[in-house]
Amino acid sequence: MTPEEKRALQLTAVSVREGILTSTHGAKAGHPGGSLSAADVFTYLYFKELRIDPKNPRWEDRDRFVLSKGHTAPGLYAVLALRGYFPVEELPRLRHIDSFLQGHPNMNTVPGVDMSTGSLGQGLSAAAGMAKGAKYLGKDVNAYALLGDGELAEGQIWEATMFAAHYKLDNLCIIADINGLQIDGRTKDVMNTEPVDAKFAAFGCDVVKVDGHDFDQLEAAFARFHENHGSGRPTCILMKTTKGKGVSYMEDNAGWHGKAPNDEEYAKGMAELAEARKALEV
Amino acid sequence: MADVKKVATRDSYGNALKELGAVAENLVVLDADLAGATKTAIFQKAFPDRHFDCGIAEANMIDVAAGLSTMGLVPFAATFAMFAAGRAYEQVRNTIGYPHLNVKIGATHGGISVGEDGASHQCCEDFALMRTIPGMTVMCPSDDVEARQMVKAAYEMNGPVYMRFGRAATPVFHGEDFKFEIGKGEVLRDGTDAAIIATGIMVPEAIEAGKLLAEEGINARVINMATIKPLDEELVLQAARECGKLVTVEEHSIIGGLGEAVCSLVSERCPVPVKRIGVNDEFGHSGPAAALLEQFGLCADNIVKQVRALLGK
Ligand SMILES: Cc1ncc(C[n+]2csc(CCOP(=O)(O)OP(=O)(O)O)c2C)c(N)n1
Ligand SMILES: [Mg+2]
């Protein structure tokens, strides 16, 4: 990608992060940490990778995205709003009693959401069903699922991965956000899922490891996914990330998994993001 | 009923899928290493590339079905009732029920008539589990004719469906001219002394009980309630008003199934005495299906006894 393109993505990612703070602040609840760690991949997916049409959210031949780690809905909603699925002004109404922005993704109320999620461990199976359906129907449609690293402890993830390899779903892209944290602390302490790369490889995936905050590396990883078409192998992108990325006091801190910023914290976070934007604009 | 033709409704399921498959191009079938037992193998033989075995991974199968349905396909997912409604309850609840997806669950081997496999496989809780999910249609056919029509009706409606089929061969009493309709009960015998409301393979037993009672001068109405949810409320309330006493019969726990659905309805809208016949809050055990059904009181003789008791006779 050109430096200009990259800068545009970086600027959009700042807006996504602002949307995450704005929505969780407005909700007085929600999950900023894992939304921020995935803000760059959300941006890359919705502004570069996915074949979608925000004017026609249910276009039959669109690529499908399943947020298996559904608690990071603030990140998904922010990117959907910025991509034009609904007005960004809706974001602060996240989780409000009369809002369509449910606490976890709802495919029937939020335009652009392809699968209702929130119960961890299930989204990858649904994405595998989409990929299988696309193959069965002879459609050139890709399915993507974003998982958390804590989520990898769910046995169903491995059932789904086995299914994907068995049915040669090379149109399925598994993305795991390896931020090293879950609710109760460090993933390696709560339930060590490492070596994640060897596990996905053993289950039949082509595994690509990237820095999840580096757009060049993300581009290369998704290029590899496209090269894998025809190989019969699902692709698994393991993104090393920092939970809370971009908001200093949230970074690498399990305490910010499911807590909203108060007014003061919100102002500080927004100021930091404004700085980040300024730095990109010069 | 020794001379009556008997068919297991799981066979009806497999046969109906095959028949539908020939005309319904968007129908696909999933199984979890039980295709021979659930009878989806009948479909598989005819349409091998439309039958996806998921291996022994029921939770994944249910959510794969959800994903397939969003692609415009109509997946029928099959496994034993124990694993479809039990193991995968939360998958059904959150990823099929909550988004109200067009997935059909064909659960075979429901109830204690599973027989020799014993309690681990005798699911008597599936109606209860599935009924609590908003928007879920829950059905259990009484014989082969109804089962085959039910599969077709499930395909034709939009939305999630749970169907329970049986393992054991049971009498076929409907004629081919029978017309099944989702949400509609069927009055098989008229009477006003009491009403027997039965579902699934208990319906032939209820018919038999109706005959035996008539010989004693008791005229019981016999109703086949193949759709447990949404319940045919009008038919139940009419029976409550006209008969005054109800007996429900199901091969399911007395907790949470047809009996409780009927009780909830009449207690709010037309209170009358109800006797629930079912599995009395206990696990089953191994044995031949027919002997088990008799032992658990899921037979015509016990229905007769309970109706008599309810009438104080
Ligand atoms: C089945 C299930 N169990 C528990 C939860 C509660 N929960 C929500 S988020 C979370 C931790 C997720 O950690 P991880 O997958 O690492 O996500 P991330 O760090 O990206 O936020 C848990 C346990 C849930 N949503 N679903
Ligand atoms: Mg994590």
Image (cartoon, coloured by chain):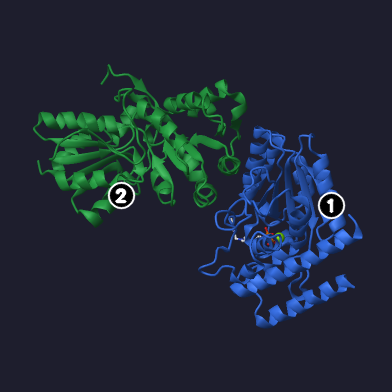
Q: Amino acid at mark 1?
A: Glu
Within 10 Å of the Cα at label 2, are there few (<14), some (14-19), or many (20+) other Cα atoms? some
Q: Quadrant of residue B203?
A: top left
SS of the residue under disc 1? helix
User: Where, quadrant-wise, is the N terminus of chain B in this rendering?
Assistant: top left
Residue B14 position, x and y percent, is 47, 26
Q: Which chain is green?
A: B
Mark 2 CB near ligand 1 (8 Å cut)? no
Instruction: Determine which residue is flagged by label 2.
Output: B260
Alpha carbon distance from label 1 to label 2: 57 Å
Q: Quadrant of residue A214?
A: bottom right
Residue at the far bottom: name it: A264
* Position of residue A266 in the picture relative to residue B266 (left or right): right
Q: Chain of mark 1?
A: A
Q: Amino acid at mark 2?
A: Glu
Residue at 79% of width from left, 37% of height from top? A229
* Position of residue B84 in the picture relative to residue B293 (left or right): right
Residue A215 position, x and y percent, is 84, 58
Residue at 91% of width from left, 60% of height from top? A3
Q: Nearer the viewer, residue A201 or B98?
A: B98
Residue A270 position, x and y percent, is 74, 77
Quadrant of picture, ligand 2: bottom right
Residue at 76% of width from left, 41% of height from top? A205
Chain A colour as displayed = blue
